Image (cartoon, helix red, strand yellow):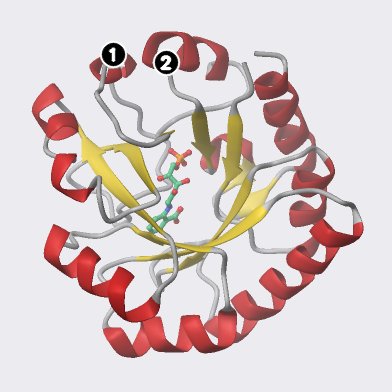
């Protein structure tokens, strides 16, 4: 079975290249000032341009994702015009109507993150199904967390069992090279996302861990 892996929270060209070399399906670039992985849009545009040309040069298929939290239209306009990602990930409290508006106005394929603690949270994702390219099921962050994602928290993967999705979805939250096989086996995910599990400190990606994660996924 081919499982697609997204390496999220990329902040430098070297990590992007390593992930592309090892056939990551997607790279995520964060715009959220409180995050140790935050990039201003100029830097994000540069990293995405570099990753996109390296992907083409290496004849790979890695897609670039801009990750934003409750963005207004002005921010999305700048991303659409200047950053030009393949997809935009909405990682806040965007309603289905807001997501529909964003898809219609900007025409960029979307990933909508869903915070999961219970089976009810999983099933509540249904209204987004028709307007997004992918859903990303992530653990609900702890109450005292300052970030909505990238905190290494995981949820009960069996909550995803038999989820009746129209489209391939991503499993996220607390994944790492050592638990990704079990996570896929329990959740039946066909796409996985990792951030802090391939870092040596918050915001500092570790080349060896990125390779290890992608090799673990390739072996499934
Ligand atoms: O990673 C961040 O700093 C972040 C900040 C604001 C919104 C989203 C963020 N991350 C989104 C992701 O897709 C992460 O990869 C996902 O939450 C999983 O993170 P982790 O549990 O660290 O693997």
The answer to whether the residue labelled 1 contacts the one labelled 2, judged by CB atoms less than 8 Å apart, is yes
Helix or strand or loop: what does disc 2 sit on? loop
Some atom of ligand 1 lies within 8 Å of the CB belonging to the residue at label 2: no
> Nearer the N terminus, badge 1 or badge 2?
1
Residue located at (9% from left, 28% from top): 120
Q: Is residue 161 above or below residue 139?
A: above
Q: Is residue 140 above or below residue 78?
A: above
Up the image or down, 214 lies above or below 181; here it is below
Q: Position of residue 136 (x, y in %)?
A: 36, 42
Q: Which mark is residue 69?
A: none
Quadrant assignment for the N terminus: top right
Residue receiving disc 2 = 188
Q: Is residue 160 above or below residue 111?
A: above
- Residue 161 — which label? 1
Position of the C terminus by quadrant:
top right
Q: CA distance from mark 1 to mark 2?
A: 7 Å
Which residue is drawn at the image coordinates 60% and 47% (left, top)? Answer: 201
The reply, left or right, for residue 3 in relation to residue 157 is right
The answer to which of 106 and 7 lies nearer the viewer is 106
Task: Say whether residue 213 is left or right of residue 68.
Answer: right
- Can residue 137 be spotted in the picture? yes
Q: Position of residue 55 (x, y in %)?
A: 80, 57
């Amino acid at each position: 079975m081919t499982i697609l892996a997204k390496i999220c929270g990329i902040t430098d060209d070297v990590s992007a290249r390593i992930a592309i070399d090892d056939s990551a399906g997607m790279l995520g670039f964060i715009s959220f000032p409180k995050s140790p992985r935050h990039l201003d849009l100029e830097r994000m545009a540069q990293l995405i341009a570099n990753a996109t040309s390296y992907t083409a040069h290496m004849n790979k298929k890695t897609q670039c994702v801009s990750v934003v939290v409750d963005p207004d239209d002005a921010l999305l306009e700048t991303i659409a015009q200047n950053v030009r990602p393949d997809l935009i990930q909405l990682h806040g409290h965007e309603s289905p109507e807001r997501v529909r508006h964003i898809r219609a106005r900007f025409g960029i394929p979307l990933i909508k993150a869903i915070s999961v603690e219970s089976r009810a949270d999983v099933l509540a994702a249904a209204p987004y199904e028709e307007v997004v390219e992918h859903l990303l099921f992530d653990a609900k962050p702890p109450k005292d967390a300052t970030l909505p994602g990238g905190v290494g928290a995981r949820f009960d993967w069996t909550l995803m069992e038999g989820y009746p999705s129209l489209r391939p979805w991503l499993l996220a939250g607390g994944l790492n090279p050592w638990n990704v096989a079990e996570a896929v086996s329990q959740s039946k995910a066909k796409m996985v996302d990792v951030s802090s599990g391939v870092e040596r400190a918050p915001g500092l990606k570790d080349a060896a861990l990125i390779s290890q994660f992608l090799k673990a996924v390739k072996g499934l």
